[in-house]
Structures are given as structure tokens and as C-alpha cells.
Image (tube, rainbow, N blue to C red):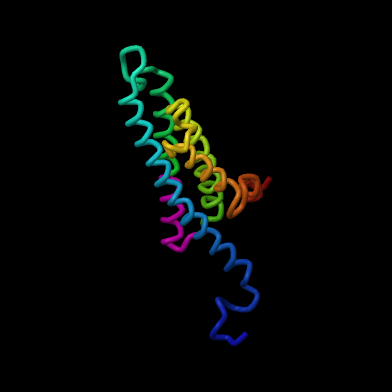
Amino acid sequence: LPDENRLGPEGAGANIFADSMEWERSSILASHIGAMERQLETSIQYAQEREQYGQSIGKFQSVANRIVDMKLRLETARMLLYKVAWLKKNGKNAVMEAAMAKLYISESFVQSGLDAIKTHGGYGYMTEFEVERDLRDAIGGTLYSGTSDIQRNIIARLLGL
């Protein structure tokens, strides 16, 4: 391989790969944040419009709490992603933070997908509402770019376990 075609010095492949995985994980996760935001907005709108027993279902504590949990997951996920981006932008190591963000965001996307389906009731399971599609999309996020178990292994190793 000619020197001008190398990505770095000889023997640096593992470091280059690790750095690219940090970027990949944070880039992929940005789309999850957008989808989680859409799930939240859709669930809020549905909870405000759908009525049961003479009031919007959003007035029921169990529905409201579920939506609050979706908001909490979204904002926590956003902050984790921003931290990884900040570290990478400033040339700092972000292996631990990228693994934590990948793990948290991908699993939060699945949970928010389940919560959106529960909020929509039977309609949430039907393809006409497209709520179920987010859950199908979310499950893949726990598999690609390193499964959730792999992320836990990375974090544990970096913690010295």
C-alpha cells in the first residue's frame, strides 16, 4: 500500500478503528434522538386528543407518567450524545462515553417505542399509525455497531472489571 493511501502510521489500525467507532456510534445515535423526539411529540398529541371517560387520556396519571419517562430518556440521551460530540470535537478520548451513549440511547429508544405503543393502545400496534415501526427500528440499534452486551463489556473493562 503506498504511503499516501494510508490512514495513519503502520501498526495504528486498532487505534484508527477505535476512533472511527466512537464517531460512528455518535453519528448513528443522532438519528435515534430524532426518532425519540418524534415518538414523544406523537404520544403527547395523541394523549391530548384521545378521550376516555370524558377526559383526555393524558390526564390519567399512568399515561402522563409514561410520557414523562419518555421525555426524561430523550433529554438524558441527548446530553450523553452531546458529551461524546464535545469530547471528540476537542480531541479527547471518548471510548467510555461513546459506549455509554450507545448503550443508553439504543435501549432507551426501545423503551420509548414500547411506551409510545402503550400510550396509543391497540392503535399503537397497527401499521396505519406508524408507531410500531419505531419499535422495529429501535431494536436494530441494540445490535449494530456493537450489541448492548458488547457496550457493557467495554464499559466494564474501562472500569477495571
Q: Nearer the viewer, residue 160 or 81?
A: 81
Report whether 45 appears left or right of 158: left
Residue extending farthest to the bottom is: 2
Q: Is 80 included in the stretch rendered in magenta?
A: yes
Q: Nearer the viewer, residue 10 or 43?
A: 43
Most common secondary structure along the magenta stretch? helix
Residue extending farthest to the top is: 53
Quadrant location of the N terminus in the rendered image: bottom right
Q: Is 124 included in the stretch rendered in magenta?
A: no
Which residue range is magenta in the image?
A: 78-93
Report whether 160 appears left or right of 57: right
Quadrant location of the C terminus in the rendered image: top right
* Residue ID at (41%, 36%): 129
* Residue ID at (34%, 23%): 50
Q: Identify whether 105 is placed above or below 5.
A: above
Return the x and y of residue 147 as percentages of the image width and height. 62, 48
* Residue ID at (53%, 48%): 102
Q: Nearer the viewer, residue 140 or 87?
A: 140
Return the x and y of residue 23 as percentages of the image width and height. 49, 60
Return the x and y of residue 98 as percentages of the image width and height. 52, 52
